[in-house]
Amino acid sequence: MTRVLVINSGSSSLKLQILDTAGEEELAWALVERIGEPTGSLTVRRTAMTGESADERTTEEAFADHTAALGRVLELAGELHVHPTDLGVEAIGHRVVHGGPEFHQPVLVTPEVEADIEKLELLAPLHNPANLRGIRVARELLPGLPHVAVFDTGFFHTLPAAAHTYAIDRETSRRWDLRRYGFHGTSHEFVSRRTAAVLDRPYDELNQIVLHLGNGASASAIAAGRAVDTSMGLTPLEGLVMGTRPGDLDPGLIIHLIRDRGMSPGDVSTLLNRRSGLEGLSGARDFRELLSRVDDNDDDAVLAYDVVIHRLRRYIGGYWAVLGHVDAITFTAGVGENVARLRADALSTMMDWGVQIDAEANENGSGERLISAPDSRVKVLVVPTDEELAIARACDDVLGLGPDA
């Protein structure tokens, strides 16, 4: 039985999960929020296991930094008998958003790897510093275990040059490694492999479009098991409309705001990362609130929803042209898995392309499932993503811990 602790460190949060990769089951889970603020929150949960009932500890207190937060997690985990040493954890996996040109595969963390991740902070200033902070804190407090970094960009290393190249001066792009890297790769790979399993088809024979739709959103085109296009680019700003990010926009808009409207680069960064997308269009970044306001005929919410659907259709159609033919379209992540109306509306113009939705299957059910009609030439699925399990499996592969090692 292989047990892995997976850590996802944000700028003011820590998410942790201990998984048994052989049985694909969660053993413990923790979440710390509002790190560095006057009052933070912490929940540690023990999942029901053989000989142990489910249990939980919660607290609201100040966590000065990530070291204090992880230390408190470990303390409460010990009270619940789910400290990593109690459960026989063999490795720790870390999500790192940007791997840049250096990292294509998960790697064992060393001081040299830490230094390389730090150099990539310019490419992902909102994510990589927080990811690296989590790695350093965990290596300090849990030094006896191997640590593995798993990169969101890794799956998209296979993008052909035509897909990842920006049409700018080639010397500038080479000097600064300016290219499309893509993100959510761990999710896209996990979901696309599960899609093949659900359909009982060989992974390397399927052409797929995967739609990861949550507060962050991205699309991918996967031909015979290889990513050939994705919606996010150098940063996670490009592509689909998201909770607070705009997705595609004219780069001239940024120049105009800075040169002609007096906004600073910092102001524009805040606008594009925090005050755009659903939040900027409607004031509602949560999709449930947005739909409630759509039902109330709120003009801003209706427009925001229409923009989301228009952008989704444009990407699905574009990826269809890139792939030539499509065997499966899969929805995943919080919005993709739970909003039936969005799935139906996004695909409603594609009936002539062989997409037929089963309305009842789309509206009902949970977990992995087909939502296309039996006579639909293109299969449409909902597949819940599990990035933590994918990261844990990557640790198995890197360290040779899995049952086939």
Image: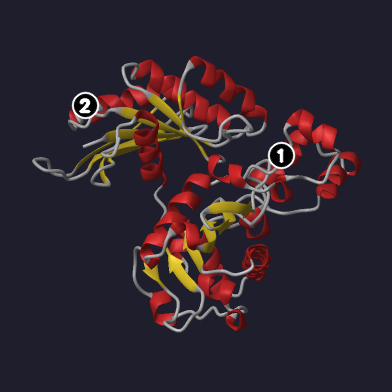
Where residue 1 appears, x then y in whole percent?
21, 37
**In the rendered image, which residue does mark 1 sit on?**
269
Q: Quadrant of residue 68?
A: top left
Query: Would you identify the image quadrant in which residue 140 lies?
Result: top left
Where is residue 284 drawn, in percent x and y? 58, 58
Q: Quadrant of residue 392?
A: top left
Secondary structure beneath disc 1? Answer: helix
Q: Position of residue 382 (x, y in %)?
A: 43, 65
* Quarter of the figure that contains the C terminus: top left
Residue situated furthest left in the rendering = 51
Residue 121, position as x, y percentages in the image: 63, 28
Res 153 visible: yes
For label 2, the residue is 78
Where is 403 relative to 163, above or below?
A: above
As shown in the figure, which amino acid type bears the numbered disc 1?
A: Ser
Element on which disc 2 rests: helix
Closer-to-camera residue (113/122): 113
Query: Could you say which is closer to the camera, residue 75 or residue 112?
Result: 112
Disc 1 from disc 2: Cα separation: 41 Å
Q: Which residue is drawn at 75% across and 41% down?
A: 268
Q: What residue type is labelled 2?
A: Gly
Relative height, residue 30 to residue 198 (above, below): above
Q: Which residue is drawn at 52% across and 21% down?
A: 113
Q: Which mark is residue 116?
A: none
Relative to 114, is 284 above or below? below
Q: Note whether residue 217 is visible.
A: no
Residue at horizontal 64 percent and vertical 32 percent from the top: 101
Position of 167 relative to 295 (above/below): above
Judge left or right: residue 400 versus residue 336: left
Q: Is residue 293 left or right of residue 57?
A: right
